[in-house]
Amino acid sequence: MAASPLLAADGDPVYRVVTHFAPSPHPGMPGPYPGQVVRVHSEKSIDSQTDKVDRAVVKQMLSTGMRALTGDSRDEDAWARFISTSDVVGIKVNCSGAPRICSSPEVVAGIAENLVAIGVPTKQIYVYERFENQLQSVGYPKYLPEGVTVTAAESSRGSILGYDPHTYVETSFFGEEDTRSNLIRLVADKLTKIVNVPNMKEHQAAGVTGCLKNIAYGDFSNVDRSHRFEKTNTRTFIGTLAATEPVRSRVVLNIMDGLRGVWHAGPFSTNPRFRFYPKQMMFGTDPVAMDHKLIDVIEAKRKAEGAVSLFDRSREHLGENSDPNRNHYIREPGHVEYAASKGLGVYDDAKIQLKVMEL
Amino acid sequence: MLLLLAALPGLFWEGGADTASTLRDAGISHIVVPAAQSQSWNGVSGITVETGDLRGAVKLLTPTVNYRMNQASASREPWLVANGWMFLRRPQARFYYDVPGEPAALAAAEAFCYGANALVKTDGAGLQPLARMLDFLRGLNREDLPPVADIGFIDDASPAAGEVMNLMVRDNLLFRVVRAPDPTLKLNVRLGSRDYPLEDAKNPKVMAQTIRTNLTDEKRTLRIYGSPVVVARVSASAGRIRVELLNYAGPARKVNGIRVRVLGNYPQHRLAADDGSGVELLDYTAEPEATEFTLPELKTYAVVDLSH
């Protein structure tokens, strides 16, 4: 790989994908339900005054969502479509705004309970994230069935030991010395299936952070190099990582936790002003279609708040982002459409079937 | 071709014989003292003494990393204070460090790594770390292997050339100083030439990037992934290659894993690391094109010998 950025004819970075994993005959993404998204909304799911989640309602939302997605009348049948008792299952949480916003422990616990209910031993279930300090700030273990492992790739920030040296995407964005982004070792070595649990958040660089970004930047090392400057490389990097085997094959289900949301200055949510409560969850196997719907949610909220569109690219809006009309980066929500070009799902709105359930 | 001499750096000590117990307690067994002090050390047991001075020696910087977290920057790369380029520019010179405390160990390792003729002056806090490092260095299998270079650099002795050499060392662009372009090397660089205009050398980082681009990463004998604070020195002879790794952050901020790629197929390996008992190379792969391994921990200095 050359030192200076290698650009293809279209001006995009050139990526070298190194993996010895072959795609499964039926890759998890876009999976058996391309272009299909189920949204379950419940006003009772979270109290926006106290920020308290109603665990029973979440359980009901999970059940409703899974049944609506699959058409099954029993939860066990719905889950068994994706996971078998011999699988080693990773639940990929998002803790980059934790503890203020993250994959809610009530949602994660509900997913783990469903896995146990279909016979997956708890010792075969892993809740995982990249950074241990963020993961620990949530306190998942007290919500989870006993025996489920909660683990992070980087117990020491920046350590490469939690990553597979043989599976990586190599590129040079700006002449950085470390040109590799390696896959989490747990994903490469142990997991056979992954349930992806992103949040509903705006992202300063990527536009939104949903299914695709959680499974891409959340599963590979050394990814923040894609957004060191105002003009980022998130548009192509996210989809490239998500499409890398075995990630593409093993992510069999996406459950987007939209109980809480961030509509500006994401993903970390340091400013309470930019948090909101969508009070919903989305279900699907197609991360592109789901993230398209996420864009709609964030755009609608930003419009209601009088903020510029995620798709705005004017330099006059670059700057300190305590103002919702300013941002540190030119956002790249186009990463979702780009991921469709990698075969990860359906972006065309006319071809996306959204099923809305109200509880 | 200049060989790595692997000379052991000496402790330059200005204290009198009444400090002998301090030195012994720290594990120091050999010192270099000013001539004026020499006689007072006669008959002191447990410490061998030689005479030396710092006059005429080139003073080096304290090797370290400046993270500059309080400064806005387009890059998050930390700033390495490294002296490698000084050794490469003046291989016959005498050098000295004036390094109090723990970094004395890194200074000794740095000088040893480059085979430099160097003294280390330190204080009481630096004695024990230095003694431990000197013990480690003494125990290494000293081999005079020629250094490996991908780049020939024509050094015009200017400050600009020095800065470019400094950046190349820090960026692990392996070079040696040449008088004229050497066709056996993969790339030759002369500042002021069409490809490397002096104007560009005003920003040595940009120049180092240009050199890297022209060389290409594929042709680099060595790559390091996972840490921006590790500098490598490579030497080789038929069928063997030695990779020496220096962590400029020092043991207080040990590196938790680096991946190293070396051109060539070397199925055999042997690791020696300071304070690294139990550390072994991980995920070792030797393929026709290149050999790769992970060093799971690097406190200050490690030596990896690879062979066919």
Image (cartoon, rainbow, N blue to C red):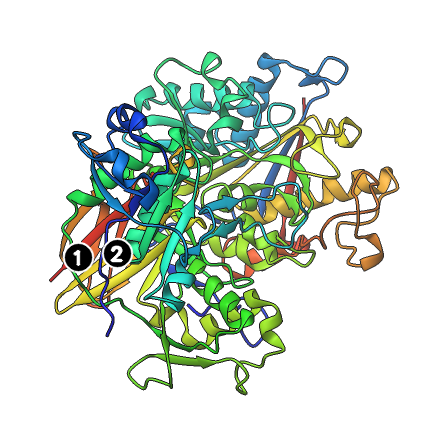
Residue name at image x 52 percent, y 30 percent = A66
> What's the amino acid at mark 1?
Leu
Q: Chain of mark 2?
A: B
- The residue tagged 2 is B243
Quarter of the figure with residue B4 = bottom left
Picture disc at residue B172: none
Q: Which mark lies nearer to you, 1 or 2?
A: 2
Viewer-proximal residue, B75 or B91?
B91
Dots 1 and 2: beta carbons under 8 Å?
yes
Residue name at image x 17 percent, y 30 percent = B46
In the displayed structure, does residue A334 sit left or right of residue A283? right
- The residue tagged 1 is B306
Relative vertical location of residue A71 with respect to residue B215 in this rendering, above or below: above
**Same chain, labels 1 and 2:** yes
From mark 1 to mark 2, how far is it between C-alphas?
A: 8 Å
Relative vertical location of residue B182 with respect to residue B102 in this rendering, above or below: below
Query: Callout 1: 10 Å neighbours few (<14), some, many (20+)?
Result: many
The x and y percentages for residue A320 are: 79, 44
Q: Chain of mark 1?
A: B
Viewer-proximal residue, A323 or B122?
B122
Res A161 visible: no
Residue name at image x 32 percent, y 46 percent = B35
Query: Callout 2: 10 Å neighbours few (<14), some, many (20+)?
Result: many
Quarter of the figure with residue A198 = top right
Q: Quadrant of the N terminus of chain B?
A: bottom left
Q: Who comes first in sequence, dot 1 or dot 2?
A: 2
In the displayed structure, does residue B252 sit left or right of residue A106? left
Res A325 visible: yes
> What's the amino acid at mark 2?
Val
Relative vertical location of residue A333 with respect to residue A299 in this rendering, above or below: below
Q: Quadrant of the C terminus of chain B?
A: bottom left
The x and y percentages for residue B272 are: 20, 44
